[in-house]
Image: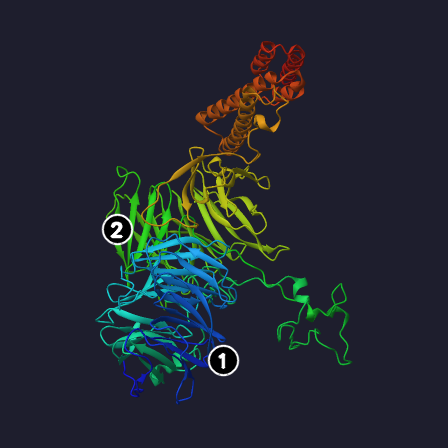
Amino acid sequence: MTSTAPHRPRARPAHTQGSTHCAYTPDGSKLVTVGSNNTIRLYKTGFDGEPINIDDCQEQNLSVDASDEFFVVGSEDGTVSLYSIPNATFDKFLLRCSLPIRDVALSPDSKWCAVASDELTVKLVRTDDNTKIRHLKEHNKSTKHLSFDTKGTTVALACTDGIVYVYSLTSDEPELIKKVDGVIGALDTESDASSKISWHPDGRAFAVPTPTRDIQVISKNDWEKQRVFANGHNGDVTALAWSPNGAILASAGKDKRILLWETKTQSVIARLDYANVIDIAWHPENNLVSFTNSDGEVYIHPDFVPEQYEPLLKLAKQPAPFIHDPLSESTNVRRPLGNGAGASTSVLPQRQRAASYDSLMDGPLEEDEDFVVDDDGAGYVLNGNGKRIHDDYDVFGEPASKRPHIEPEYHEAFQPGSTPWRGNRKYLCLNLIGFVWTVDQDGHNTVTVEFYDHEFHRDFHFTDTFLYDKACLTENGTLFSCPPKDDTPATIFYRPHETWTNRTDWRTQLPKGEAVLAMSLSESFITVTTSANYVRVYTLFGIPYRVYRPKSTPTVTCASWRDYVMTIGNGPVGADGHTRLLYTIENVKRDEICQNEDTVALPEGATLKSVFFSDNGDPCIYDSTGTLLTLLHWRQPSRASWIPLLDTKLLPRLASGRKTETYFPIAVADDKFHCIILKGGDQYPYFPRPLLSEFDFSIPLTSEPPKSKAANPDAMDDDSPEAEDDESETRKLEQQFLLKGIAAAQLQDLVESTSGSHTQRSSLARLELEIDKTLLQFLAVECREGEDRGMRALELVELMRDRTGRMVEAAGKVAERYGRSILGEKIREVGERRVNAMDDDY
């Protein structure tokens, strides 16, 4: 319900008719107004008398911004002037441009002033030294409005071409990082309509008027549309400003009204009748707003927010209105405090880890940080004699109560193959079968499932009233889950692609308050990890198969393949304060544990980005360092080891250093890494649906480029084209030898654990033969290098797996072909030893 404030302040004639603007100092003590005449007025807050006038100024002043000590004014004659507030006098010209100034903005620390004019280039000038100027020139049109974010690290420009250009100021040379198109309209610099960029006080988003007379919120992290303040004005928006805590948005329009919007609900809470308003300024502390109009008048409006909504201004800083706020939807969980499956759980955003022990010792502890009450008589406070018992001192002689508490940092839970919300869209699942995505439609979602092979299955979509936030997709079906909300429990929904009965899908609910953290779908089972620290396993048609509590909690994620389930959870805390991730792999159907609470091999500070099984059924992980690893010997307890298959930072496409990109992991199949290439600093893929890319495996061995002649002009033999070719071929053969060895080891494990089929054993024999052929090619390269590489060449022969002697015999012929007689003799000795060994076996 909206209301109109009963008290109406008087209009104060401040300037002649024309563009009039105002700004409060950050401390709220002064209000500065500028206008079309050659007078600037300084109003003292709380004083109703005449303002201080500064007559030594330009005419046709079009913009103003203020700090506590000075303010800057941009004029139509192209000058930017700086004035002293304590002295109420002109100080200096900060900048001169050849065309009219349209907007000025001071950085949060007041050290820089951004200047927008009818020139194409926006200038950043140092307020204490106007010889220091930076130029923003990667946009194509003149700028109507500009604004610093709350940290001063970026500046956003609203240009006359209808595009918002965002520049990063973190380096000496400003860099264009984003073009936000399709939000503001194309406006002339002299237009009364506004495209002003107003940053929300929490710094995570900005609001901007749209051509449809609404106000759109854009998030800073991904530059996507968030909530919209709609259906308020009947005319173009001319001004807008957030309250200091971000709880209320004030906007003015050509419909001769000022609207007050509640940020949380985007609803109008008050309508005030004021015409021709072109600038609004909130007092930084009080319920006080000043605004100016095109008649040269200024209004200083106490009790601006109606009494019933005034408590909104007393709240702490409020969050920007996101469609899906990443802070409120964080899946990082802490260990539940309650007991039992139905106990309430606490799903909290990730806490920053406390400082190190040494840094905490440098300063005082937080109040009450060392406060302990001896409420059970356990003897951990002072005894009756005023002395601590010996157990209250640590090994360094420090009182135990003074030891700082290091808060462990848990790894956040995640769903493999999914992305966070960006605006109102989110990928629930991305894999080689297809992809599942959802669109928030305010009250319900629309879910779409698409397949790469349309001959395999047809795409489908449906209206989702459950608001599913996770999904898995396989050849057999699609699995969904939604979080608990109010009194509605979390729900799991499975829809098979094909069935021979009428009933095709099923749902089941989790205990009240229990949320799904991650889930996986194989051709045999459904696995769900929950916030109650349970792993729940279902058959494909909803029969509960197993429920157990994993040893490593809180759980992080899971993956499955056929009857095998891999769960990952937070383990003990390491020396750096981060928890170590532990994984368990078990065969659910046979009730056998293959690996029990083993360590996920992550470098210090790295996080897990995805986990999945390859098409051959081997576990793989991808971490934040851009490294893909697979697990070797995982079917044999205590033998598993993580083997790197690819380091994406060493890809040849990045060798020049001119290209910056990251990769979103999708799958490992056909001995390749399938992923989505991300550019422009993106962390997740977005719409329209990106194309899949694939990279061959390349075990990280060296990042050195091939040698060139310039490196050593005297060594003609080593730097010849033939030598470079040999070096390149050597690296290629090294990769083949290692990769085929890994493939053979994985296939050998499969054969031994399943009493392998004839096809599997034949494949293993072919793979071992290919390894020997690779070594034979390697041997030829070494023989070409000369007699001094003989021992390395002989080592290659000894690595051969063939026991019949045929490959060793072929190696001898290679040595003879290159005239390596001594090497040939050594190779024959190796062959004789192998034949004798075979005879001994019989």
The residue located at (26%, 80%) in the rendering is: 274
| Position above or below: 461 against 720 | below
Q: Disc 1 marks which residue?
A: 87
Q: In this view of the protein, which residue sits in the foreground, 531 or 419?
A: 419
Q: What element carries label 1?
A: loop
Image coordinates for residue 352, horizontal then vertical, percent: 54, 62
The image position of residue 319, as x and y in percent, is 41, 68
| Closer to the camera in the image, 719 or 457 | 719
Residue 437 placed where, x, y %?
A: 32, 51
| Image quarter (top left, top right, bottom left or bottom right) of the C terminus | top right
Tell me, yes or no, if residue 221 can be seen here.
Answer: yes
- SS state under label 2: strand
Mark 1 neighbour class, 10 Å CA radius: few under 14, some 14 to 19, many 20 or more: few
**Residue in the picture at 40% in, 66% down:** 79
Mark 2 to mark 1: distance in Å? 67 Å
Instruction: Decide if residue 21 is on the left or right side of residue 737.
Output: left
Q: Residue 461 carries which label?
A: 2
For residue 116, above or below residue 83:
above
Q: Where is residue 295 in the image (x, y as percent from the top left)?
A: 27, 78
Quarter-wise, where is residue 145 in the image? bottom left
> Sequence order check: which comes first, mark 2 or mark 1?
1
Q: With 388 as the anchor, is 255 left or right in this view?
A: left
Q: Residue furthest front?
A: 56
Dot 2 crowding, Cα within 10 Å, few <14, some 14–19, many 20+: few
The amino acid type, in three-letter code, at marker 2 is: His
Q: Which of marks 2 and 1 is in front?
A: 1
Front-most of residues 230 and 585: 230
What type is the residue that disc 1 sits on? Asn
For residue 265, say whether it is visible. Answer: no
